[in-house]
Amino acid sequence: MDRQTLSKNLMWVAVILAVSFILFSFIRPQSEKIEEAPLSEVIVMAHNGNIASIEVKKNELHIITTSGDEIKSYKESDDNVRELLTAAGVKIEDGSLKLTVKPDESNIWNQLLLSLIPLLILGGILFYMFRGAKGAGNQVFSLGKSKARMFTGTKSMVSFTDVAGMDESKQELEEVVDFLKQPGKFLALGARIPRGVLLVGLPGTGKTLLAKAVAGEAGVPFFSISGSEFVEMFVGVGASRVRDLFEQAKRNAPAIIFIDEIDAVGRQRGTGLGGGHDEREQTLNQILVEMDGFESSTNVIVIAATNRADVLDPALLRPGRFDRQVTTDLPSINGRKAILEVHIKGKPLQKESDLDVMAKQTYGFSGADLANLLNEAAILSARRDKKEITLSELEEAFERIVAGPERKSFVISLKEKEITAYHEAGHALVAHMIPGTDPVHKVTIIARGAMGGYTMQLPLEDRRLVSRSDLRKKIAILLAGQVAESIQFNDMTTGSSNDIEMATSMVRKMVTEYGMSDKLGPRTFGHKQDMIVLGRDIASQRDYGDRVADEIDKEVAALIDKGHKTAYDILTKNRVKLSRIAEYLVAHEMVEGKELKKLFDEPASDVQIEEQPAS
């Protein structure tokens, strides 16, 4: 226990004891109450010989009668009891009445203590308050100090070898590292240091990891701070912190300043939110001044990260401030495999487990998602008392992330189980029979999350461009579940609502955004307004008339009907195969691998997607 804590505890103990003493003095039990009598009655009793003794103590008279009773009385401060009794004819000299006058024997120290206790309590409270005010004053004076954490490279830092799947981004940042290590090589050719590097990408794509890797490779002081840490309720604090941060970086140059989530303070000015002189805009103004005020010989680089570059102020993005913008995309199939190999270090993986399968299966996963996937697989392996992570745990972890945990306690009737089986069999069969689609990897009717079952397709390659024919195939596959229910049971259920919603949204985008309509041509319909609430666009402006709106609705309905007809033709011509897959799912709840291939390899006729010539 330190001295400050000990003194604080002792002070509180003293206060508690003092308060207890005062309370005890008020609530202590009183002696038996003595009868009181007026002084005139006492004199009459003494005249009649009924009093044995009188004891005078200041203005209080303690009287004992001849019968042994005690009486209390009071006199004026100027009265003399002896003179009053003598005037009343009471003879004191003969010894019939004993009169005793005692001086005031009250303890002066007790009175002093009782008078000092409130003063001591008040003094202790004032001392504590002033000491707290002194600490608060120190905090007030430190408000303008930067809260950035400084890393000097003494701890284990991240290097470029720990960053996988972002070769182009690393190449851009390697020049920054080279400049920090050998600035003379660039300055000799008249090149100036890039003052700012903006890392832009989706959450989890490795922006912060890249910034740490730059600091680790360069071996220079690294100042890390979040954009939200600049802003306080006091006006001017953020700007003061910016000045202090840049002064620290210049003193330790060459150095790196990393501002994470810069959109918290770097949003566009003049939007009318918060006025033109609020704290956030003052902080942004100071950042702009500091970045543009660097001298050419100052080796300080600002690295910032954001996933909302569209809301940043244009002054931040101009040359001379953030000279470079490095985009961190979602990793490709090779990048995903490299990321998995980085994160599998330190985790025992079974030799037979092939990461290529997981790299193909995890299309659209970010680096953070892949790290979470391996962590979930390790947790599952430990839960099953295994010594190694197998492909089974990897796939189970993938399904938990994508669809949710398996709901083993979810019990459905045999009828609903059969409907779900035909629904998923319809998806799987149409996806297999249409040429050019991704192969079906797994079909299950085991409930996960909000889904009663699902069909998993394993893409052969990553696609950034999606053709119109591919979208039409996806629409037919989405509608195949409802078509299968209708063919087998001559009825429909609510289980297809999400499929229909996705298909309708896809078709409407084809018509209004992608220009894939033969009738309406290569046009976009509807202008999105720059109205963003909670980070999402919530408003769009209609820039077409009612006649065009009717044409859009007709074209959407026509494309939906074509997808529905494609799924219907495939399932009706392969009715036997549909029933076999559904019966297998009812019996085993899941099918994949060789068994699935065996069910698909029954003779069946292929149905081509009808293509219309582009207008």
Image (cartoon, helix red, strand yellow):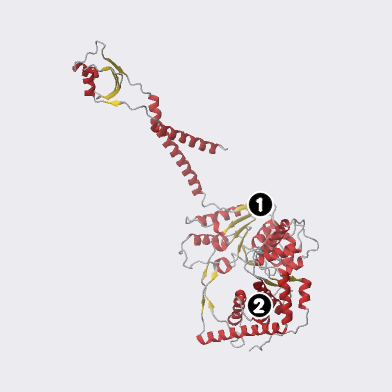
Could you tell me how far apart the alpha carbons at marks 2 and 1 are, in whole angstroms?
Answer: 59 Å
| Callout 1 crowding tier (Cα within 10 Å): few <14, some 14–19, many ≥20 | some
Q: Residue at x 48, y 37 (%)?
A: 12
Say above or below: 185 vs 481: above
Q: Quadrant of the C terminus?
A: bottom right
> Circle 2 is placed at which residue position?
481
Q: Is residue 516 visible?
A: no
Q: Is residue 317 visible?
A: yes
Give residue 501's position: percent from left, percent from top.
59, 76
* Quadrant in the picture for residue 294: bottom right
> Circle 1 is placed at which residue position?
152
Q: Residue furthest top?
A: 94
* Quadrant in the picture for residue 167: bottom right
Q: Residue at x 69, y 85 (%)?
A: 569
Q: Residue furthest right?
A: 351
Q: Tell whether label 1 touches label 2 (CB within 8 Å).
A: no
| Amino acid, disc 1 | Thr
Say above or below: 9 vs 441: above
Give residue 258's position: percent from left, percent from top.
61, 58
Give residue 101's position: percent from left, percent from top.
29, 17
Question: SS class of the residue under badge 2?
Answer: helix
Q: Nearer the viewer, residue 205 or 31?
A: 31
> Of discs 2 and 1, which sits in the foreground?
2
Q: Nearer the viewer, residue 453 or 333?
A: 453
Mark 2 vs mark 1: which is more N-terminal?
1
Q: Nearer the viewer, residue 240 or 417?
A: 417
Q: Residue at x 67, y 67 (%)?
A: 365
| Amino acid, disc 2 | Gly
